[in-house]
Image (cartoon, rainbow, N blue to C red):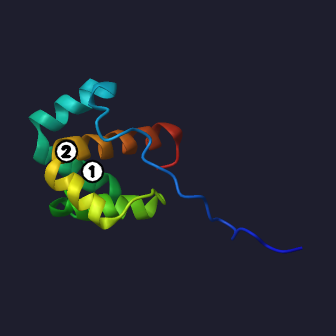
Amino acid sequence: MAVTNQPGMYQPSDFQTNLCDVCDDCGTCMYVVCFYPCTGCSIASDMGECCCCGLGMPIRSVYRTRYNIRGSMCKDFMASVFCSLCATCQLKRDIDLRKEQGIF
């Protein structure tokens, strides 16, 4: 019998919400808008990373790698630079959803 999947491997997925789904969770959206630096520290803390890394492309890339989410560093950079609030909201929503699902 041939092994087609490595044990413990899982298929690549996408973020559980889209980049512009800010209205799906208005509480998170308002938190990010009003307390943007605090959100970065919260995200970094959740991921066990330094608070200085809480916003932008590096933390997004680490998160994608950790949960095997499709994308690239270039896309992470573009989202973080041109849609920073939306990208931060998306990341925070995904973390919160994974916590609820018990997979974070």
The quadrant where residue 20 appears: top left
On the rendered structure, is 37 left or right of 86?
left
Q: Quick one: label 2, few (<14), some, or many (20+) residues within 10 Å?
A: many
Judge by depth and name the residue closer to the eye, 93 or 74: 74
On the rendered structure, is 52 left or right of 16?
left
> Is label 2 in a helix, a strand or a loop?
helix
Q: Position of residue 41 (x, y in %)?
A: 19, 52
Is 43 situated above or below 30? Answer: below
The numbered mark at residue 19 is none
Is residue 54 visible in the rendered image? The answer is no
**Which residue in the protein does label 2 denote?**
39
Q: Which residue lies at the image location 44% right of the left edge and 62% below the top edge?
A: 66
Is 80 situated above or below 9? Answer: above
**Which residue in the protein does label 1 denote?**
43
Cα distance in 3D space between marks 1 and 2: 6 Å
Q: Amino acid at mark 2?
A: Thr
Q: Amino acid at mark 1?
A: Ile
Q: Which residue lies at the image location 79% right of the left edge and 73% below the top edge?
A: 3
- Mark 1 touches mark 2? (CB < 8 Å): yes
Q: Position of residue 82 (x, y in %)?
A: 15, 50
Judge by depth and name the residue closer to the eye, 99 or 32: 32
As drawn, which residue projects farthest toward the right? Answer: 1
Is residue 66 visible in the rendered image? The answer is yes
Q: Quick one: label 1, few (<14), some, or many (20+) residues within 10 Å?
A: many
Q: Which residue lies at the image location 23% right of the left edge and 52% below the top edge?
A: 79
> Is label 1 in a helix, a strand or a loop?
helix
Q: Which residue lies at the image location 15% right of the left edge and 62% below the top edge?
A: 52
Judge by depth and name the residue closer to the eye, 8 or 12: 12
